[in-house]
Amino acid sequence: MVARRESESQRTTVQKKSEREVVVTRTFDAPARLVFEAWSRPELFKKWWVPRSMGMTLRSCEMDVRTGGKYRLVFGDDPAKPMAFFGKYIEVVPNKRIVWTNEERGDAGSVTTVTFEERDGKTLLVMSELYPSKEALDAAGTGAQEALNETFGQLDELLAELSAR
């Protein structure tokens, strides 16, 4: 019975909270400090962020995770056709919260808020994507949210490795 509860607690849930907001939750079996590090240190972030099944390459990962800092992630196997995601960090509270803009879509870009709440050595992660309009959310689609289950599984693997050290 315990194993069943653990697997259910690690399930990724995705909910459309309004016509402009999607919220993803997941509990990780690691302290908030380690989960925050995995989200804020480029050398760790690039180990888990891209779903392996997609066969994509994260060509570059520039992250200055501090309030006012910027990020730029470039994906793709063909250097002539890279996909870039970029923006700035609006708020960073170590081990608690990261808020950033997603500027690659121009005015249709979302603001992402990730919170890290530690409970008995585990971390409840809540990630909110707030779009400027219903149309912007609809245009973004659900592909990234669907990939999060695999991505978060990869994060579980990394956190187990970091916790064992």
Image: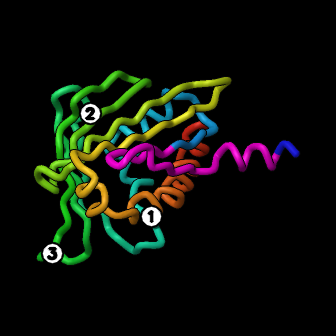
Q: Earlier in the sequence, mark 1 or mark 2?
A: 1
Q: Which residue is mark 3?
A: 81
Q: Report the amino acid beneath label 2.
A: Val
Q: Which residue is mark 1?
A: 51
Q: Which residue is mark 2?
A: 65
Q: In the shown orientation, is residue 110 left or right of residue 40?
A: left
Q: Dot 1: few (<14), some (14–19), or many (≥20) neighbours within 10 Å?
A: some
Q: Residue at x 25, y 65 (%)?
A: 75
Q: Which residues are magenta?
A: 3-24
Q: Nearer the viewer, residue 16 or 162?
A: 16
Verify CB contact (< 8 Å) between mark 3 and mark 1.
no
Q: Quadrant of the C terminus?
A: top right
Q: Nearer the viewer, residue 20 or 87?
A: 20
Q: Residue 118, how many percent across, how many down?
A: 57, 25
Q: Residue at x 42, y 73 (%)?
A: 54
Q: Residue 88, how many percent across, how many down?
A: 18, 38
